[in-house]
């Protein structure tokens, strides 16, 4: 299986407004960073959110778990690793590792996304491209 297609990696620098008075990143920002990492991973797979929405589907967060291990600080270069663990029916499970500038693990998390048909407001099967990634058979379609 091609683990590269199941994994993504982004880097960012926390902004001053994301901190408390001590320069420590507020805990709520980690969940926002998960969203940023997930969005970029989907784009790398040729499935940007915009294209999914144009197809009439949305991926809505149905579960979030966060485990804080160490603080993150203003202006440190942070790395967020995203890994798709599984796809099943209308759900996709992703895990995240947030790493500090020295590679130390600051936080780990999980999100479960539900695929929803926008017009019907009902769950629908995940796009075939995501299911193919999970099964180890990446899509041969053109990337956008």
Image: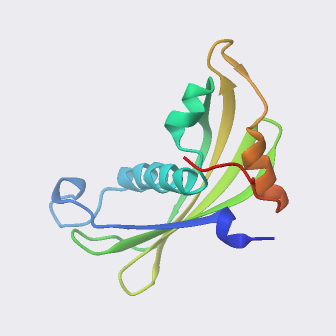
Q: 10 or 23: nearer the eye?
A: 10
Report the residue at 39% width, 78% height from top. Answer: 100
Left or right of residue 45: residue 124:
right
Report the residue at 21% width, 71% height from top. Answer: 75
Looking at the picture, how far across and down is residue 111, in whole percent? 61, 49
Q: 93 or 44: nearer the eye?
A: 44
Q: Is residue 47 above or below residue 98?
A: above
> Which residue is the extreme one toward the bottom?
102
Looking at the picture, how far across and down is residue 117, in whole percent? 68, 21
Looking at the picture, how far across and down is residue 25, in whole percent? 29, 62
Looking at the picture, how far across and down is residue 38, in whole percent? 53, 52
Left or right of residue 30: residue 94:
right
Check the picture and name the quadrant holding the N terminus.
bottom right
Q: Count the marks.
A: 0
Report the residue at 61% width, 35% height from top. Answer: 59
Q: 62 or 59: nearer the eye?
A: 59
Coloring basis for residues: rainbow
Left or right of residue 128: residue 99:
left
Q: 43 or 11: nearer the eye?
A: 43
- The part of the image, by quadrant, that contains residue 103 is bottom left
> Which residue is the extreme one toward the top?
120
């Amino acid at each position: 299986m091609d683990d590269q297609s199941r994994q993504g990696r982004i880097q960012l620098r926390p902004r001053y407004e994301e901190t408390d008075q001590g320069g420590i990143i507020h805990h709520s920002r980690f969940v926002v960073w998960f969203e940023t990492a997930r969005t970029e991973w989907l784009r790398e797979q040729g499935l940007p959110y915009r294209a999914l929405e144009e197809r009439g589907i949305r991926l809505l967060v149905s579960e979030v778990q966060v485990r804080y291990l160490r603080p993150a600080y203003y202006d440190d270069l942070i790395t967020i690793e995203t890994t798709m663990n599984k796809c099943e029916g209308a759900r996709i499970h992703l895990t995240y590792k947030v790493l500090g500038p020295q590679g130390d693990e600051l936080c780990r998390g999980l999100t479960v996304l539900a695929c929803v048909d926008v017009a019907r407001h009902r769950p629908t099967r995940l796009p075939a491209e995501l299911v193919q990634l999970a099964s180890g058979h990446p899509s041969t379609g053109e990337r956008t």
